[in-house]
Amino acid sequence: MIWLDAGTPALLGLDWGSSSLRAWLMDARGIILHVHYARQGILNLPDGGFAQVLSDILTQLRLEYPLPMLACGMVGSINGWLEVPYLPCPAAMSQLANGLGLQSTAYGPLHIVPGLVKDGPLPDVMRGEETQIVGMMGTDGAGHRTVVLPGTHSKWAQVEEQAITDFRTFMTGELYAVLMQHSILGRLPATMPPDAGQRDEAFVMGVRTALSGVPLAGRLFSARAAVLRNRLERACAADYLSGLLIGEEIQVGMTAMDITPQAAPVLVGEQALCQRYQLAFTALGHHAPPVAGNTAPAGLFRLAQAAHLLDLPPTHFHDQKGAVA
Amino acid sequence: MIWLDAGTPALLGLDWGSSSLRAWLMDARGIILHVHYARQGILNLPDGGFAQVLSDILTQLRLEYPLPMLACGMVGSINGWLEVPYLPCPAAMSQLANGLGLQSTAYGPLHIVPGLVKDGPLPDVMRGEETQIVGMMGTDGAGHRTVVLPGTHSKWAQVEEQAITDFRTFMTGELYAVLMQHSILGRLPATMPPDAGQRDEAFVMGVRTALSGVPLAGRLFSARAAVLRNRLERACAADYLSGLLIGEEIQVGMTAMDITPQAAPVLVGEQALCQRYQLAFTALGHHAPPVAGNTAPAGLFRLAQAAHLLDLPPTHFHDQKGAVA
């Protein structure tokens, strides 16, 4: 008989995005037993599609019995495995847990977290970040918080108690990538590789121009002009551009989200990127926000708890094992 | 003997940019006798380079004698035929005329107009637009004007009497192109082609969000979210994005350039694009600026006059013809 003890798998959580997926095998207390990473996002599926990927993961994990499975991210989008309708924001954690979609698989049901939508004059959507935010709520005592999730489509979200009350998307990461790869700003070949200090300096120089009060559109070209005028090392132009974009995001975010000292931001996401954001916050005269790391597994665990996915008796798994064996 | 009468070629003017060139054969009064267009910008030169292109043009024009030649644009950049140093802004027309570079060719000297640079915390540069602005000065009675040159790198310039006193670049056209071609915003396939009215409506909807006071970075993603939420026809997403970018440019330009009613803007450039800008100005509650069309040939002619390139006696050309015949 298999008990849901520490060390015994109790939940398979997946963050299944556009270009990659992460899966976490967790025990009944949410402790991560195993991490699986694959470049098998919904846009890079192998032959056999979603079902094949799930089968590969379960085979690699050598799980011989059905397990509660919960996924978040683009797997629930119109191009995903099952389209799970967006929930309107504000949304409490309990509403997210009640809005799970249900895709049947050869290994039992796969539950999928819905995204959030904000309608109005500037519509906005998120898929996946709602789960990271729920994960952050669990590690954070504050009732009212701003959560900043840097990335391709950075999200700024307001959290109140156990609900997401507002959010806004900044295309910072994607703008940086397309401008570096495809615009004149990327055509500034490096002379010699700069050291980390020079790169940070160029980054901060970019961030600080956000203080000039002139929005991005009127500043972007300065990344080229500054190089032409020898005010910026060619090899540091990328860092300056990154600073321009992140500085703008923080300036706009801090103003638009009406952030009070009680609601000081917390950063959620990849370590190196969060550190760049910390540098930018301080360059703009703010406190450096704490970094919560990747809170997706914690969010999946909390949503699985709230949706009672972990409430099945241990024997259920045992029985199922018997059934498939 | 060849007289510099109406109808007699007196100047070859060239606007030689990155991707294409335009050449105008003008008489002694600046009247255009012939227009030549080629996709032989400084980045698309044939074997034989700059000299070959110039030779082809002169051969096509069947000019059998040397002629004053004046070029503006990227031909004077570091990757051009001859690097002509930027002049600092503010710059009077007479300073531009005195700062011409001189490249010797098989057909006599090619004069090249210098670009302008603005140093300071946000450096900026232009090459080619200074000539268009000089051309606009000649057609415009007002002493103090804002000239808006829409394009890949839109320029907003302040003109006072016969001088360019300030300017600023907006990467509007390039941002639109890279976002449509390479970002998630371009991945919104059209269902059916919209009519012009629908497209204008989506464009104005984009422009109007500039009035919300939230800068571009916090609005760009709405182009995607609005389609996902069925608030915007997929096929009109490009027009909405164009509206977002042009609306931002105009909002920022009008504020940053501190435009007084006396200095109401005038549009210089391609007709269809200028008309879109007119629509955007009115959607933002401004007067529609007049359109001056392409003023590059007029600018080249005025600079040639100011640099005394047209002052050579007619017999000079006759003699030269005799010399080369």
Image (cartoon, coloured by chain):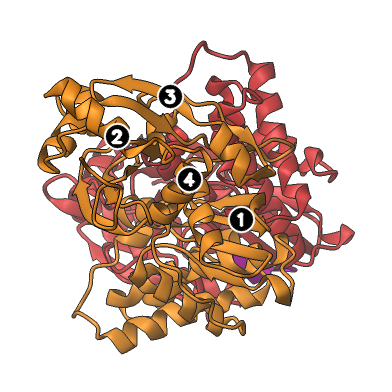
Chain colours: A orange, B red
- Mark 4 vs mark 3, foreground winner is 4
Could you tell me if the residues under marks 4 and 3 are in contact, i.e. CB atoms within 8 Å?
no
- Mark 1 vs mark 4, foreground winner is 4
Pointer 4 or 3: first along the chain: 3
Q: Is residue A317 visible?
A: yes
Do callouts 4 and 3 point to residues on the same chain?
A: yes
What residue is shown at x 35% (from left), y 29% (from top)? A110
Pointer 1 or 4: first along the chain: 1
Gap between marks 2 and 3 measured at Cα = 23 Å
Gap between marks 1 and 3 measured at Cα = 26 Å
Magenta portion: prevailing SS class: strand
Task: Say which element carries label 4.
Answer: helix
Q: Chain of mark 3?
A: A
Q: Chain of mark 4?
A: A
Pointer 1 or 2: first along the chain: 1
Judging depth in this view, the residue of A129 and A29 nearest the camera is: A29
Pointer 2 or 3: first along the chain: 3
Q: Is residue B12 visible?
A: no
Can you identify the residue that label 4 sits on?
A305
Judging depth in this view, the residue of B20 and B12 nearest the camera is: B20
Relative to A263, residue B226 above or below: above
Disc 1 marks which amino acid? Answer: Ala
Can you identify the residue that label 2 sits on?
A315
